Amino acid sequence: MSIVQSIIDVVENEANKSGARSVTEVELEIGRLSGIEYSSLEFALKVLAPSSILEGAKIVLSKPPGIAVCNDCSKEFETNSPINECPVCSSYACSIVRGKELRVSSIVID
């Protein structure tokens, strides 16, 4: 619930800066390694959005996959885990470079 409230706060602040009367669409980018449970997020949006500036707005949810890079051989690969073995050199010295995102990527206002 607190994450959705933070999203609503961000959208309200941006809408107020622009003098918007309403928001018609919000695009959220929430990576698969962000630790966010998508069904819980969607439930919280259904509960909190109707009493906020998001009331009636279309919510577009983008779920970028996890991408890691091996620090030893520079191989980039897709992953579903924060701890990885490189598929090329078997090193565990890998860093997550994508998939932890949690951001409002666009807002369409009236």
Image: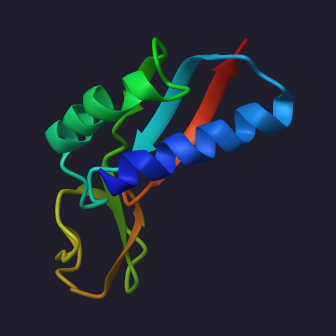
Q: Is 71 displayed left or right of 83 in the figure?
A: right
Relative image position of residue 107 (x, y in whole percent): 63, 27
Relative image position of residue 14 (x, y in whole percent): 73, 39
Q: Is 94 displayed left or right of 101 in the figure?
A: left
Colour scheme in the image? rainbow
- Which of the 4 quarters of the picture holds residue 98? bottom left
Q: Is 67 displayed left or right of 25 in the figure?
A: left
Point 40% across, 28% down: residue: 49
Q: Is residue 23 above or below residue 94?
A: above
| Nearest to the observer: residue 35 or residue 95 | 35
- Which of the 4 quarters of the picture holds residue 78? bottom left
Q: Is residue 48 above or below residue 3?
A: above
Q: Is 84 displayed left or right of 15 in the figure?
A: left
State how many labels appear.
0
- Work out which residue is located at the far front of the displayed protein and give it: 51
| Nearest to the observer: residue 78 or residue 64 | 64
Point 73% across, 11% down: residue: 110
Relative image position of residue 44 (x, y in whole percent): 26, 38
Relative image position of residue 71 (x, y in whole percent): 40, 83
Q: Is residue 88 above or below residue 106?
A: below
Point 17% across, 80% down: residue: 90
Q: Is residue 78 above or below residue 86?
A: above
